Amino acid sequence: MTIFKYEAVNRAGETVSGRLEAEGQNVVVEKLRGMGLMTVGIKEVKQSTFAQLKLKTKVKLGDLSLFSRQMAAMLNAGIPLTRALFTLSRQVTNRGLGEALNNIAGNVEGGTSFSEALKGHPDIFNELYVNMVSAGETGGNLEETLNRLSSQLQKDKELRENIKSASFYPVAVLAFAVIILFAMLFFLVPIFVGFFPPEVDLPLPTQIIILLSDGLQAYWYIIFPVLGLMFYLMRVYAKSYTGKRTLDRLKFRVPIFGELIRKSVVASFARTFSTMMATGLPVVQSLAASGNATGNTMVIDATRLAGEKIQEGSSVAGPLEESGIFPPMVTHMVAVGEETGDIPEMMDKVASFFEEEVSTMTKALTSLIEPLMLVVIGVLVGGMLIALYLPIFTVITEL
C-alpha cells in the first residue's frame, strides 16, 4: 500500500493534517469522510529505496514490549496520546517501528482512533495487540491495557528464547557435523583411496564411503542444486496450511522436544487468554485471539471449534478438553475459573506454571544434549575414519 499525506477540515472548521496508508487516493477520501473530515488536499509520499528498507526492518517482541511500557507511562503521566506517539517515534531504536509510530501519530492527529491506526501496520501490530488496544480504549483503561500487553510480550519473548536456546545447540552441532562429513567425502576419502592396494578386498563400510565420495565428486554440480531445491520445496510446503498443520502435529511427537514445544504452546495460550479476559474482551474473541497467538494450527483449530460450541451454549472447559490438545490441568483450571467467575486468575496461574516448566526443561535439555551431540559427532566422524582405516589394518595383518 501507498502512504498519502493529507490536509482536511474537521467539523469545528479547524485544519488538520496527517498521513494514511491506503491503496489509492479514493480510499483516503473515503477514510477521511468516515472520520468526519472534509478533504482539502492529498499528496502521495514518495519513498526512496533506503526508506522502504527501513520500513521493512523487523520489529522484535522486545521492541514492542518496551514501546508499550513507555506508552503506558507517558499516558499515565497525562501526556496526550498524539504527543506521546510522536515523542516515542523519535526515541525508539528500531527504525521500522519509529516510521510506523510516526505514521500512526499522524493518523490519530487526523481523527483516527489509536486501534484503527494500528491496523495500518499488521506486520508490526498483530490482531491480538489491536484488539486489546481497542478494548482498552472502549473501557477507558488504555494505560493498564498497554502495561498488560508489555508484560505479555515480555513473557512471549522469554518463552521463545527458551525454545531457541534448547534447539540452537543440537541444530548447530548437526549442521557442523554434516559440513565435516561432506568435507571428508570430498577431500579426505580420495587421499585414503590412493593408499589401498588394488588386490585388497575392501570391507563393505569402506566400499559404501568410497561410493559416496565418488558420487559427490562426479555429480556435485547436480547434488547441491537438488538439495537446495528440496530444501526450498520443503519450506514452501511448511508455509502452506496443510504443511504447517502436518509440521505442528509432528512437533508434538518429537521425542523430548515435543513435550517442551507443547508446554511452551500451552503457556503462550494461557498467558494470552488470561490477558484478553482480564481486559474485558468476550470469551469467544479471547479464545480465537489466544489460539492465533500460539501460531500452532492445531491449537488455532481447537479454539475455533471451542468458540463455535460456546456460542451454541457449551461451557468453555468442555470443548477444550474434547480437543485433546490441552493437558488436564488447563481444562480443570478453566472449569474452576468458570465456577468462580475468575478465569483470568486461573489462566495466569496455569501460564506461570508452564512457563516455569519450560524454563526447567530447557536447562535440563541443554545439560543433556551437549554430551549427547559430542557422542553423535564422534560416532559419525569416528565411524568414517574406522571404515577408511580398515583396509590398511587388513594389509598390515596379512603381511
Image (spheres, rainbow, N blue to C red):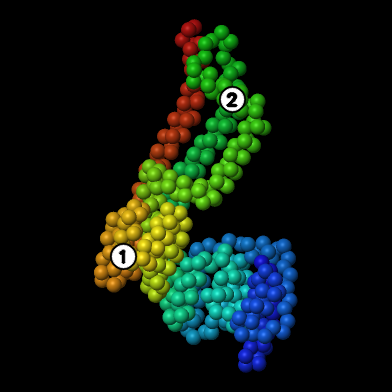
Residue at the extreme front? 312
Relative horizontal placement of residue 293, taking residue 86 as reference (left or right): left
Q: Where residue 8 appears, x then y in whole percent?
A: 68, 85
Is residue 162 something one can see in this rendering? no
Q: Residue at x 49, y 16 (%)?
A: 203
Nearer the observer, 308 or 33: 308
Relative height, residue 180 to residue 337 (above, below): above
Q: Where residue 14 appears, x then y in whole percent?
A: 65, 91
Between marks 1 and 2 in the image, the one whose residue lies nearer the viewer: 1
Element marked by disc 1 = loop
Q: Where residue 187 appears, x then y in whole percent?
A: 61, 27
Q: Residue at x 45, y 76 (%)?
A: 135
For label 1, the crowd category at 10 Å Cα-Cα, with few meaning under 14, some 14 to 19 and many 20 or more, is some
Q: Where residue 116 appears, x then y in whole percent?
A: 55, 75
The type of residue carrying mark 2 is Ser
Where is mark 2, residue-wise?
A: 213
Relative horizontal placement of residue 225, taking residue 149 as reference (left or right): right
Where is mark 1, residue-wise?
A: 315
Q: Residue at x 47, y 79 (%)?
A: 137
Relative height, residue 36 to residue 303 (above, below): below
The type of residue carrying mark 1 is Ser
Nearer the observer, 103 or 291: 291
Element marked by disc 2 = helix
